[in-house]
Image (cartoon, helix red, strand yellow):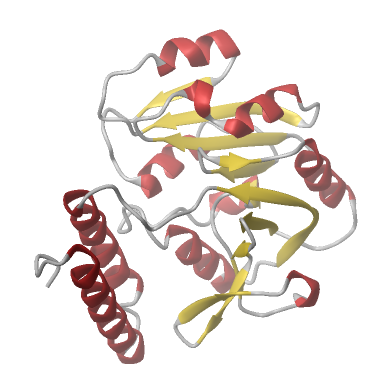
Amino acid sequence: MSISILVVLYNSSIDDVPVLATALRSPYVDDVIICDNSDQKNNNAEQAKHKGITYVAMNGNQGLSKAYNAGVKHCHGDIICIFDDDTQVGDDYFAAVSDLASTSQQWDIALPLVMAGNQVLSPSHFEKQRTVPIDPAHVGNMSDLTGINSGMAVKRELYNHISYDSGLFLDLIDHQFIQDARRLGVCIVMLKGPVLRQSYSLTTDSMHSALKRFYIFEKDAKHFYSSSFCAKLYCRIMLLLRKLKLCMKYKTLAFI
């Protein structure tokens, strides 16, 4: 099985994406697709051409879900692997995906272990409405296994049935995609072996950027948690607590 790599950029350079060097030298990778959501001028198109990468200009920030959907259309591999632009990936990742594909194990989506320092970012599972990181040693066959986009390996044919929810701009897209996939009866497994490293922080440089970031999260969260009364109630409480924390951090009422 061949593998396609899909990365979405936002105001960053192709040269600064860690996974690309690993992917371009891997014998398992068939093609690499970059979708550029940047709203600042750059030379990513030229860099992509030089490196033999398929470049898709989104002509401004269209949101992560729309960029993913556009990128998938350009992927020719049997398996599509999604990555954030700051994820550290070793050669063993692509070997592990190829090994999984060559086994008789049933799977449609595979989630690797993703760490930020000593913190497990993915996989995780839902405890009522909240996602909680799992102990990788005790994943088993969890019926509610979920995880972040970065490192997620998806069989290409699954995209013939579902796409990324365009009602979400940036946050919770990964969990929504997995929930939509699970409704189709797909098999979600953990990719055993490789450990991916991620730069992850909720901190921002200024109150203005934190406020802008919160507005995006608030809109996405309300969309994601709109399926039931309990989900909506959880969302309201969660957003209120986050607003209070941000008000205390930046010593302002701008978030209320």
Residue occupying image coordinates x 74% and y 39%: 90
Percent across and percent down for residue 254 are 9, 65
| Residue 63 shown left or right of residue 201 in the figure | left
Of the pair 46 and 116, the residue shown nearer to us: 116
Quadrant of the drawing holding the N terminus: top right
Residue occupying image coordinates x 51% and y 36%: 7
Of the pair 211 and 131, the residue shown nearer to us: 211
Find residue 228 and report its image quarter.
Answer: bottom left
Quadrant of the drawing holding the C terminus: bottom left
| Residue 43 shown left or right of residue 252 in the figure | right
Percent across and percent down for residue 101 are 82, 48
Residue occupying image coordinates x 53% and y 40%: 86
| Residue 244 shown left or right of residue 36 in the figure | left
Residue occupying image coordinates x 90% and y 53%: 103
On screen, 17 above or below 99?
A: above
Percent across and percent down for residue 70 are 42, 37
Of the pair 244 and 219, the residue shown nearer to us: 244
Percent across and percent down for residue 67 are 39, 40
| Residue 127 shown left or right of residue 191 in the figure | left
On screen, 149 above or below 26?
A: below
